[in-house]
Amino acid sequence: MRYISTRGHAPSLSLEGALLAGLASDGGLYVPENLPRFTHKEIASWVGLPYNELAFRVMRQFVTGSIPDADFKKIIEETYGVFSHKAVAPLCQLNSNEWVLELFHGPTLAFKDFSLQLLGRLLGYVLERCAKLVVILGATSGDTGSAAIEGCKHCENVDIFILHPHQRVSEIQRRQMTTVFSKKIHNIAIKGNFDDCQEMVKSSFADQSFLSGKRLIAVNSINWVRIMAQIVYYFYASLQLGGPARSVSFSVPTGNFGNIFAGYLARNMGLPINQLIVATNRNDILHRFISSNRYIKDTMHVTLSPSMDIMVASNFERLLFDIYSRNSVVLAKLVISLKQGGGFSIEQGRWIEIRKLFDSLAVDDIQTCKTIAEVYAQTGKLLDPHTAIGVKAARDCRRSLNTPMVILGTAHPIKFPEAVEKAGFNKALELPEHLADLFEREEHYTVLPNNLQVMQTFISQNFNSSQPL
Ligand SMILES: *Cc1c(COP(=O)(O)O)cnc(C)c1O
């Protein structure tokens, strides 16, 4: 399988290439040159398969030519073997024909484990074969950092530097990052906010000269491998609810449009999906686009669902590329209008095309807490604020009560105690077994000023000591 850039000026790459590149050299995002397509008959033959085996069948063609079947199978088994629930992604019924797909049974209790556990293992596999040393650099406001560290901590040839805003991530999120001890893992608390951290990461990718020849790898959701891993659970949920004979709908708590874009791809690969609901918080650029065809930047609002606090949705470019029949020239123009003019609208006909599948809702903090309380009263299930936004949007935007509605449960409520308390729930929540002693573990991190030079010098002096091979 080859991967091409949405902007049309970067070379096409293999899976390894796309994995290592992250962003394309022309600023675009990599997408598969040809999407695999399955017949209903083929999908129907997968009913009842365990998660691993389904994952192998769904993803196999994406890695053809790069990873032999036997190796890929083994990597997948290891990846989903670390999840604490035997079903990996269990469905929990909330209401008549309404389900939450629980994607928080991985090591860091958020859905990002699905993609980053796989990404870490693929990276280890690829780097071992090419004997390269790389540096993962990322900024996090919470979930991505810990999932990246957990996913990549076993890679031999990787140093991981994760920046988080000093004293601005929750204690549990900080501890999930800082208590993983290895000489290759470097947590840096920057005396600034999340945007400052992200700016430093961006500048470092743009000029990598401080790395003395090592290569920087991006593990945020622009990396194709992350999208690829997320396609699987749409198939998994559907097959348990009567698919492919029956169509299923999904409501997805959305920030950077990575998770829901995987659902769009699942549908294009042949899975009958009736409706995809984009559920946002007050940072609602996607909701404004889907409801009124205006994709316009706004300022960032801090909410109780911080993992969806974004100004622009980086993966949205991948959808636009398809909607414009993969015309990179038009796409590049839209990107420029966003940069220079702050936003754009698209041709009405193409927007209507998007509306055939997508609906959306923006849910504020008050409604989020109300939904947590309501669902708890109805079912005894405690939702995290992101998942609650998905439930609220599902209930408001649902087109058909006969079609099963699946809400993607993106995080465990224990990660977001503030929202849970505000929803009126004040019993202490228990950490899952593997994290039970999290608050006693020793932490390792370095506090640095909000200064690019200082941060880069720190990185260049603290490589895993990794001598070139
Ligand atoms: C990252 C994250 C999201 C947003 O996912 P996108 O792929 O950026 O749309 C939603 N919920 C939780 C808990 C997350 O960690």
Image (cartoon, helix red, strand yellow):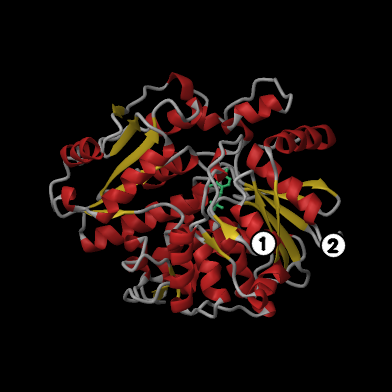
Which of the numbered marks, if any, corresponds to residue 290?
A: 1
* Residue 225 shows up from this direction: no
**Residue 433, horizontal then vertical, whole percent:** 55, 30
Q: Is residue 161 left or right of residue 405?
A: left
Give me the residue at 51% from left, 73% from top.
321
**Residue 364, horizontal then vertical, whole percent:** 69, 40
Q: Nearer the viewer, residue 152 or 219?
A: 219
Q: Alpha-carbon neighbours of circle 1 within 10 Å: few (<14), some, or many (≥20)?
A: many
Give me the residue at 74% from left, 24% from top.
424
Q: Amino acid at mark 2?
A: Ser
Q: Alpha-carbon neighbours of circle 2 within 10 Å: few (<14), some, or many (≥20)?
A: few
**Residue occupied by mark 2:** 400
List the single residue furthest toward the front: 341
**Residue 144, horizontal then vertical, whole percent:** 46, 44
Q: Amino acid at mark 1?
A: Ile
- Indicate the secondary structure of the residue bearing disc 1: helix
Depicted 346 relative to depicted 442: above or below: below
